Amino acid sequence: MKYLVLFALVCVVIWYFFGSKNKKKTSQELVMLECQGCGTFVSSNEAFYKGGRVYCSKKCKRENQ
């Protein structure tokens, strides 16, 4: 009986340290936006914004101001 309790205790400790951690999940959705300069699509986290407009690169943003 004491081995069963010891086994259960070891399982709980292992679960606590390795299984119960919530891995950080990104809730950021991937949204593709069209560049106002050249028309290519770029993800929202890589886009450049200026005056409410979306650009794919600093070059497009600079050329289309």
Image: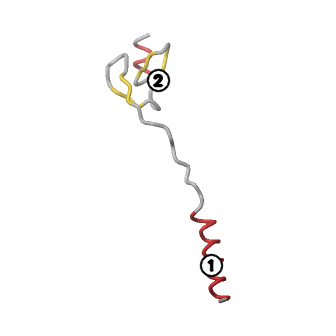
Residue type at numbered disc 2: Phe
Q: Which mark is residue 47?
A: none
Q: Which residue reaches farthest top?
A: 65
Tag 1: amino acid:
Ala
Disc number lying in front (2 or 1): 1
Spot occupied by residue 12 in the image (x, y as percentages of width and height): 63, 72
Location of residue 58 by image quarter: top left
Q: Which residue is mark 2?
A: 48
**Near-viewer residue (31 or 60):** 31
Instruction: Report the residue at 44% width, 10% height from top.
Output: 65
Position of residue 63 relative to residue 10, above or below, is above
**Rendering coords of residue 10 (x, y %):** 63, 77
**Relative to the observer, which residue lies in front, 59 or 4?**
4
The residue furthest front is: 1
In the picture shown, does residue 33 fall above or below 22?
A: above
- Horizontal and vertical percent position of residue 2: 68, 88
Contact? badges 2 and 1 (CB < 8 Å): no
- Relative image position of residue 28 (x, y in whole percent): 49, 37
Determine which of the numbered discs, if any, sits on residue 8 in the image: 1
Q: Answer above or below: position of 38 versus 21.
A: above
Q: Earlier in the sequence, mark 2 or mark 1?
A: 1
Mark 1 residue element = helix
Left or right of 47 in this view: 12: right
Tell whether 41 sits left or right of 26: left
